[in-house]
Image (cartoon, rainbow, N blue to C red):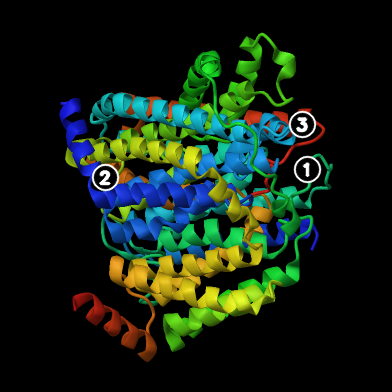
Amino acid sequence: MLLEHLATGLQTALLPGNLLAALLGTVGGIVVGVLPGLSATMAVALLLPVTYLTGPIAGLIMLSGIYCGAIYGGSISAVLLGTPGTGASVVTTWDGHPMTKRGESKLALATVTWASFTGGVLGGLVLIFLSPFLAEFALLFGPADYTALVVFSMTLMVSMSGDQPVKGVIIGLFGALISTVGLDPVYGVVRFTLGSDDLLGGISFIAVLIGVFSIPQALYLASGALKERDVTAVAPVHGSGRLSLRQFRGQALNALRSSAIGIWIGILPGIGPETSPFISYEEAKRYSRHPHRFGTGIIDGLVASEAANNATVGGSLIPLLTLGIPGSAVAAVYVGALTIHGLQPGPMLFAQRADVVYSLFVGFLICNFVMLFMGLVAVVLFTKVLGMPKAIVAILIIVFSMVGSYAVRNSIFDLWVTVLSGGIGYVLAQHRFPLGALALGMILGPILEENMLRALALSHDSWLIFVQQPIALVFLVLAVGSLVWSIRRAYLRTNLRPYTAPTSETGDPSD
Amino acid sequence: MSRQIGDLLISLAFIAVSAAFLALSFGIGDRNASLFPRMLAWTVLVFSVWYLVGTLRPRTHRHAPAAEEGVDLVHFLAVLGLALVYIPAMNFAGYLAATAVFIVAGVYLLGYRRLAVLLPMSLLVTLLVFIVFKTLMYASLPSSALDNWLTELMYRTVLS
């Protein structure tokens, strides 16, 4: 059955339009990833309207390409500039930039490319072979179980907020609150529209997502937080870019171990590709025969970091597609892409739209092959992007945000929503509010409300249904555990350490 | 604006908005339809008050400063203002004219002054986005007489 679905998925993914989507998505993702200060989340959010216009399969393949490409692209600037393009490539700078300084940038880039490809493909394979089993299990869920599952997912807002969990709760639940504007999902009652026809259809979450993830980055570039000089000092690409068979063999175990760590971290909700490289790097160091050389510019460190962060991408799609849990801001945007096509992530997606799921799986692998090809053949071209004036990048981001936001509902009102949520998002990001939690709240809010009301209708308004169903009870216990763990972690961070480091070295306002 | 004042204003804004939602939720006739937003509004309100109390406490300076170094408020406000003007401009003059002018004005405002690059780039990007959205994706963009004429011309060219 799985092989049949995969064969169909392969046929669909190989259609010219879908191949083009993979190519454009991956190249676009690399371009955005290369530029320091622009995040993978922004790239995915910015292209979200395009997925609405292209159809679900091409759109989701394109999003996968953007996500994979952006994570990989971040490593190019990490190697050449010593500045990570995205938060996921911080660890890559530790060995990548010293290699560039020694004149081995080509070798570093080739290593990064192969490691990213290995991690990406292994993550994709685990996604393909593990997801159907998890989805089958999730078919047992009823409305009460789903309610508890979404409550558990919403506790991730707290873990996204680092040492200030209150901010995550406020902004996440605020996202859910503004998603209640318009018609309610079960009874069709009009709520909070203040008599405005524009609000009758609700506040478009696409307009808000584009606003909070793209506009703040444009404003961030515009406000001069990223100095022009930081990105123009690109080191020339030189040295030999060929990895020997011995080097390949020597790194195989490191790549496998780091990929496994990356996939596991990806499956765990709330932890993304920014975290996995730190763990895999430490593990690679622990198992190495020359740990003292880590950080001086060796390929072991690059393999550990890049295999892990790219493997996390595939891993993070597992809970999203099988259970409908978006564990990160990027995953929340994926949910957005599915819901604008009337598709609900979760087990029913496998049962009802296997064509979409398996085409996405195969498309995901194709994106990794595109990434490998681009990395080995055209990496020098991508470094040219680094010379692009930031003023132009900032203004173009705003134009693409506006056009995309308008195109989905042909609504001028959505443009106001985009710009205002962008301005507010910028201010909130400056005050360390996790914008990913807002996205999570806006997307999970309606799902939670619908399932909660259905469960209550089934139980004749008895709240006990949420603790009488074993699966629901397990998720509620997990939710409590997740909250306790996050609050404890925040407490330890705040009270036991003299100084709390920022979550992203790029100062990325939306990650 | 100091960080503490910013936190104070943000917490007050959240309190005001959640209180407004709460008050409006009592106007919803259906009990089931008001249940969820009311639960959310209460929770946001309670946590916002908690946040407010936290901002009023004396600071221990344990937290790292946010990445505000080098932020140019004038550029920030200018671009935000320009984006806000861009919306009615698109509604009034259509996508093509408004976008071409917005790109030139925005980039110029941010300090890039090479008009020989800026003007053709602005026209090229504006047209490219127009063609991709109109002909490849059949999407709609805010239109004026100029936009309509160009759209018609493109479709006629493609059909012929």
Q: Amino acid at mark 2?
A: Arg
Q: Nearer the viewer, residue A419 or A86?
A: A86
Confirm whether circles 1 and 2 share one chain.
no
Residue A35's x, y, as percent? 60, 51
Label 1 chain ID: B
Question: Eyeballing the image, is B146 above or below A2?
Answer: below
Q: Measuring 78% from the left and 42% from the top, which residue is drawn there?
A: B63
Residues indicated by labels 1 and 3 sit on the same polypeptide chain: no
Circle 1/circle 2 CB separation < 8 Å = no
Of the two numbered discs 1 and 2 in the rendering, the one whose residue sits closer to the viewer: 1
Residue A265 lies, in percent from the top left, at 50, 27
Instruction: Identify the chain of the residue marked 2, using the numbered disc in the image.
Output: A
Instruction: Tell me: residue B43, above or below residue A215.
Output: above
What type is the residue that disc 3 sits on?
Answer: Asn
Query: Helix or strand or loop: what does disc 3 sit on?
Result: helix
Q: Which residue does the numbered mark 1 point to in the structure image?
A: B64
Left/right placement of residue A190 relative to residue A9 reads: right
Residue, disc 2: A454
Viewer can see residue B33 = yes
Chain under disc 3:
A
Q: Earlier in the sequence, mark 2 or mark 3?
A: 2
Q: Nearer the viewer, residue B13 or A355?
A: A355
- Few, some or many C-alpha atoms within 10 Å of disc 3 (few <14, some 14-19, many ≥20)? few
Q: Nearer the viewer, mark 1 or mark 3?
A: 1
Residue sitting at x 72%, y 59%:
A228
**Residue that extends furthest to the top in the rendered view of this protein:** A289
Q: Which of the two discs, 2 and 3, sits closer to the camera?
A: 3
The mark tally for this picture is: 3
